[in-house]
Image (cartoon, grey):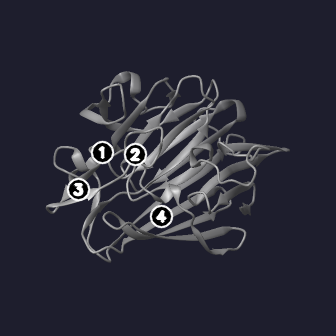
Amino acid sequence: MLHLTHGRLRARILPEAGGALTGFDYRKGADRVPLMRPFEPSATFRGKEPDPNQLACYPLLPWSNRIAHGGFVVDGRRVTLEANRDDDPYPIHGSGWQRAWQVLSCNGREARLVLDERAKDAYAYRANLHYLLHADALEVMLEVTNTGEHTLPFGLGLHPFFPRHRDTTLRAPAARVWLNDGRSPLPVECVDVPPAWNFDNARPLPDGLNHGFHAWSGDAVIGWPAHGLRLQVAADVDAFVLYTPAGEDFFCFEPVDHAINAVHLPGGAAANGMTLLAPRSGLARRFAFRVLDEAAHPLPGT
């Protein structure tokens, strides 16, 4: 476990489990308030690597969410993708989240990780993951280079799990959303965001969402009024996936650069946010999570 600390912020990283964060919290008075869902190994953990879906946040590469039909065709060449979870029929979230990352450096405020991935008939890449704590924010930089022999569509993102309380709110302006068939998140139709899912202004989270939103501003704010805290999410991408399972104490707001199943949507991968990378070409995305304490940053009018 790598430990980063700066000012009131603290982050923990488990390189062997997808380079994932196992915690990101803020010291408010004498308390530590989780800004992402924390993971604490239990007696049943016994040194085994946890499922990344138990953790706080993991990187998404070389694509986000699910791809249908066991792969796709690019430039006339079939790319086969195997399902990578026993409980899901589709290959999901790429491969980076299920690999052990190597630590290049860690100095207490920042950590640099690297991953070399090579699949015989699919994706080969080198990825760099950089975590940096500022006094009031966690910055995450994710980079990937195509080390294979063929041009392929790449996409990047993050998969954070945030605490959800009864009063949790979200502001995340977006114009469009992909509807699904209700049986899986695979999109079937892109429409204007309906009023019930409009997050142009801060509002409580509805249950049951598992959809990709697009034409996002790249700026969002999560609010925890009971703690007097907000978390500003800023990213150089224009899409997010919002997952709000009923009855759970977490939700997922996943900033990404492409649509779910982009390779099979009308227009193809590039038209739906992915980047076609030629061999030795690269792509980088930046994400920042800035904590706003209402005691120091009151809302307008308060």
Q: Dot 2: within a 10 Å radius of its alpha carbon, few (fewer than 14), some, or many (20 or more) residues?
A: many
Tags 4 and 3 touching, CB below 8 Å: no
User: Residue, x 32% and y 77% (percent of image)?
Assistant: 280
What's the residue type where badge 2 is placed? Answer: Asn
2 is higher (above) or lower (below) than 265: below
Front label number (4 vs 1): 1
Circles 4 and 1 in contact, beta carbons < 8 Å: no
* Label 1 – label 2 distance at C-alpha: 7 Å
Left or right of 1, for residue 75 = left
Q: Which residue is mark 3?
A: 270
The residue wearing badge 4 is 142
Label 3 to label 2, Cα distance in Å?
16 Å
Q: Is residue 287 left or right of residue 82?
A: right
Query: Which quarter of the image is occupied by the N terminus?
Result: bottom right
Disc 4 to disc 3, C-alpha distance: 19 Å
Q: Residues within 10 Å of mark 1 (few under 14, many from 20)?
A: many
Label 2 vs 4, first from the N-terminus: 2
In the picture, the disc for residue 65 is 2
Sequence-earlier tag: 4 or 1: 4
Query: Nearer the N terminus, badge 1 or badge 2?
Result: 2
The location of residue 267, given as percent across then percent down, is: 16, 48
Q: Disc 1 residue type?
A: Asn
Q: Amino acid at mark 4?
A: Leu
Q: Are marks 1 and 2 in contact (CB under 8 Å)?
A: yes
Q: Earlier in the sequence, mark 3 or mark 1?
A: 1
Name the residue that disc number 1 marks. Answer: 261
User: If the image is split into quadrants, where does the C terminus sit?
Assistant: top right
Cα distance, mark 4 to mark 1?
Answer: 21 Å
